[in-house]
Amino acid sequence: MPQTFLSLAIVTIKVLNNIIRIDVKFVQELVFNNEIIQDQLFHLFNYLLVYTHENYDKCEDTKELLHETLLFIGYYCMLNENT
């Protein structure tokens, strides 16, 4: 993955994390009630987790991307009655 794409992915996940910190229930309901968003997030996070697992030791940005991805997944699952 090019460095520019990796940096963009990190910033994007950080933005998602900031949004979910502001209103966790809203994001949980938005994702749960929209099957298209559910599918796209599943595929995105699946790819990011596989990529970071395979490239964990190659650079610090990969570790940061994994950290931010796991934070979002944790926020989404936190006290979510729908999951």
Image (cartoon, helix red, strand yellow):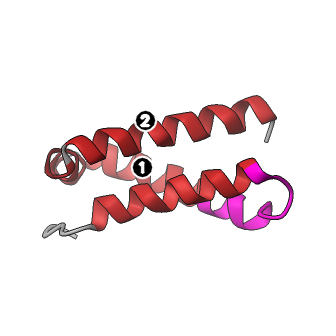
Tag 2: residue type? Val
x and y, in percent, of residue 75 in the image: 32, 59
In this rendering, would 27 be left or right of 17? left
In this rendering, would 28 be left or right of 45? left
Give SS at disc 2. helix
Which residue is painted at 36% across and 40% down in the image? 18
Q: Callout 2: 10 Å neighbours few (<14), some, many (20+)? A: few
- Which residue does the numbered mark 1 point to in the structure image? 41
- The foreground one among 24 and 42 is 24
- The foreground one among 23 and 28 is 23
Separation of residues labelled 1 and 2 (CA atoms)? 14 Å
x and y, in percent, of residue 48 in the image: 61, 54
The reply to whether the magenta stretch includes residue 48 is no
In this rendering, would 44 be left or right of 9? left
Magenta part of the protein: which range?
Answer: 49-60
Which residue is painted at 83% across and 64% down in the image? 57
| Quarter where residue 66 is shown | bottom right
- Which residue does the numbered mark 2 point to in the structure image? 15
